[in-house]
Amino acid sequence: MSGASATIVRGAWVLPMAAGSDPIRDGAVLLGADGAIAAVGSFAELSDREPDATVAGDGNGIVMPGMVNAHTHLTECLIPGMGEDAVLYEWFQRVVNPVGELIVRDEVALGTRLKAVEMLRSGITTVNDMSCHRNVGSLATLGAVDGLAWAGLRGVVSFGAEDMYEGAPGPEPFMAEHEALADRTASEPLISFRCGVGTVLGLSDQLFERTVSACREHGWAVHTHLSEVREELTEGRLRWGGTTIERSGRAGLLDAEVIAAHCIWCTERDIGLLGRHDVAVAHNPVANMLLGNGVCPVPRLRSEGITIALGTDGAASNDNQDMFGVIKTAGLLHKVNTMDPTVIGAREVLAMATIDGARALGIDAEVGSLEPGKRADVVLLDGNTPELATIHDPWQQVVYCATARCVSDVWVDGVRRVEGGEVPGVDLPALAAEVREAGADLARRSDLGSESVYAGDGRAFAGAGA
């Protein structure tokens, strides 16, 4: 390797997250010009090997793999901060569905660009998106690919199709959007496609069967929601005589490679089905708490060998795309829910956000850990911040102490996408101004006057104290 094209990322600690690996004190990661990791080891060893390499980091910070945001909705990027007092179905009706009827590709692309900056600045290098809308024929989901490609993020994109609403067309336009999205991602080296199932209850039997058949025909992997709210149990049993997970198993959906968000209200039979079909679960603790959905039984699922990844969920249900909030919440939630501080540890939580997230998406041979030959998705946390100035235990420091403010530098596929906490080449004030105008316009067109100050008479703040 030529030293002129090599970069060494140095830290007080390197957390490789590879199987059987230990943290490396005064460690470093050598990035090659081909976008791959060339070596992982001590800084002394790698600097001797490549004395002319560019060095990033002063040896006080933490070097870790880029985090995997295993579940979000990039169609929500323009509508954060509304509906905090709504349960899931109310939230759909008040916020998401009115917007979904009108949003278009360019608006999704613009919102994705802004939130991609937020994700990069919080150490996310891979995002698994399910774009959802009801503007049939608009191909709005393709905007998520446009925005991710602009930012240089690694991504997996799906269309969360649903047709159980008044005025919905037949299956053809939904299947056509799946095909169009698959075609759009085919030209992007860092972005791939999954077939989306918005919710099992949200699909007519006809569309559900067409979707399962298409997955079987094309070999498509699947991104869906399962068992998010308690009402699913009752509605599923009334409609099919079983839960949504049982329905998915009987219909053959679980025969595909599946990542399922939430999986909160699982029966023991459901858990057995998830395990037997090797379904990965995307745990979204912040969004689940905000909507009052319940607590995913992560320790129980892990005991069955089910892979658990972590996600922010959408910008309208989290209401940000900050992975540090997710990892801290995930650790704390399960300790307090079980009243057992030993039930989950910081190292396990960080694995869910990195290597297990990659494993859940079937890309763990490429990313998720710092190993020679893998793609260089790398994050450097600044050890000169108040949060990380004193590193007693690097695992706990990352999960419980660090915030997005600690992210100094981020590489995606070997390309430096964040430098000194900023995204090079992005005029953030200009982008924010453009998004502000678009978000206000979308809120007005969607008649969100009771939710957004941009759209109405201030009813969103009625009764609020000074």
Image: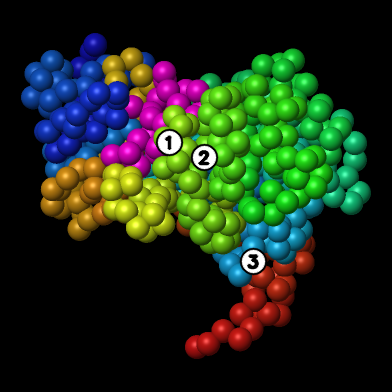
Which residue is painted at 29% across and 44% down in the image? 345
Left or right: 463, with 404 as reference point: right
Question: At label 1, which amino acid type do we have?
Answer: Arg
Residue 381, quarter of the rendered image: top left
Q: Position of residue 322 (x, y in %)?
A: 43, 51
Neighbours of disc 3 within 10 Å: few (<14), some (14-19), many (20+): some
Q: Earlier in the sequence, mark 3 or mark 1?
A: 3
**Above or below, 126 relative to 435:** above
Residue 354: in magenta span? yes
Residue 89, quarter of the rendered image: bottom right
The residue where tag 1 is placed is: 302
The label nearer to you, 3 versus 1, is: 1
The residue where tag 2 is placed is: 282
Separation (CA) of disc 2 from disc 3: 22 Å
Q: Quick one: quadrant of the N terminus? A: top left
Disc assigned to residue 347: none
Disc assigned to residue 86: 3
Question: At label 2, which amino acid type do we have?
Answer: Ala
Give the SS element for disc 3: loop
Left or right: 60, with 127 as reference point: left
What residue span does the magenta drawing correspond to? Answer: 347-369
Give the SS element for disc 1: helix
Q: Is residue 165 visible?
A: yes
Left or right: 21, with 105 as reference point: left
Give the SS element for disc 2: strand
